[in-house]
Image (tube, helix red, strand yellow):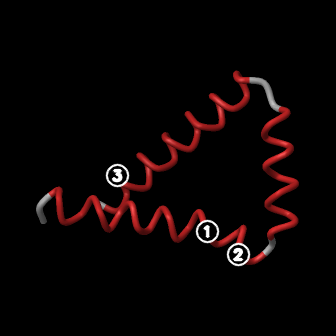
Amino acid sequence: MDFWQVFPVAVALVLVLEGVLPFLSPARWRSMVVLVAQLDDRAIRRFGFGSMLLGLGLLYLVN
């Protein structure tokens, strides 16, 4: 498959997954956003780095 065929599908899936929690439980999502806003930059970076590593690991296992 071509990159330009796969990339929009990947972006669409990210948007669907990101929208599930605010759709199902907006109050819980709002409280989670407030909690994340109170975290320091280092904690947010660590979480982002961990998410990227998990994503790369999943991609490796799938392919």
Q: Residue furthest left?
A: 2
Look at 49% across and 40% down and name the residue there: 53
Provide residue 21's location: percent of width, then percent of height: 71, 69
Q: Nearer the viewer, mark 3 or mark 2?
A: 2
Mark 1 touches mark 2? (CB < 8 Å): yes
Please state which amino acid type lies under the numbered disc 1. Answer: Gly
Q: Whole-Å distance between the Cαs marked 3 and 2?
A: 30 Å
Q: How crowded is mark 2: few (under 14 residues within 10 Å), some or many (20 or more)?
A: few
Secondary structure under badge 1?
helix
Look at 63% across and 28% down and name the residue there: 45
Quadrant containing the N terminus is bottom left
Q: Quadrant of residue 13?
A: bottom left
Look at 18% across and 66% down and name the residue there: 5
Provide residue 36's location: percent of width, then percent of height: 79, 41
The residue that label 3 is drawn on is 60
Looking at the image, which is closer to me, 56 or 44? 44
Q: How crowded is mark 1: few (under 14 residues within 10 Å), some or many (20 or more)?
A: few
Please state which amino acid type lies under the numbered disc 3. Answer: Tyr
Q: Whole-Å distance between the Cαs marked 3 and 1?
A: 25 Å
Give the mark nearest the N terminus, 3 or 2.
2
In this rendering, the count of numbered labels is: 3
The residue that label 2 is drawn on is 23
The residue that label 1 is drawn on is 19
> Which disc is residue 56 wearing?
none
Q: Quick check: 46 left or right of 2? A: right
Please state which amino acid type lies under the numbered disc 2. Answer: Phe
Quadrant containing the C terminus is bottom left
Q: Nearer the viewer, mark 3 or mark 1?
A: 1
Q: Quick check: 6 left or right of 17? A: left
Secondary structure under badge 3?
helix
Looking at the image, which is closer to me, 9 or 30? 30
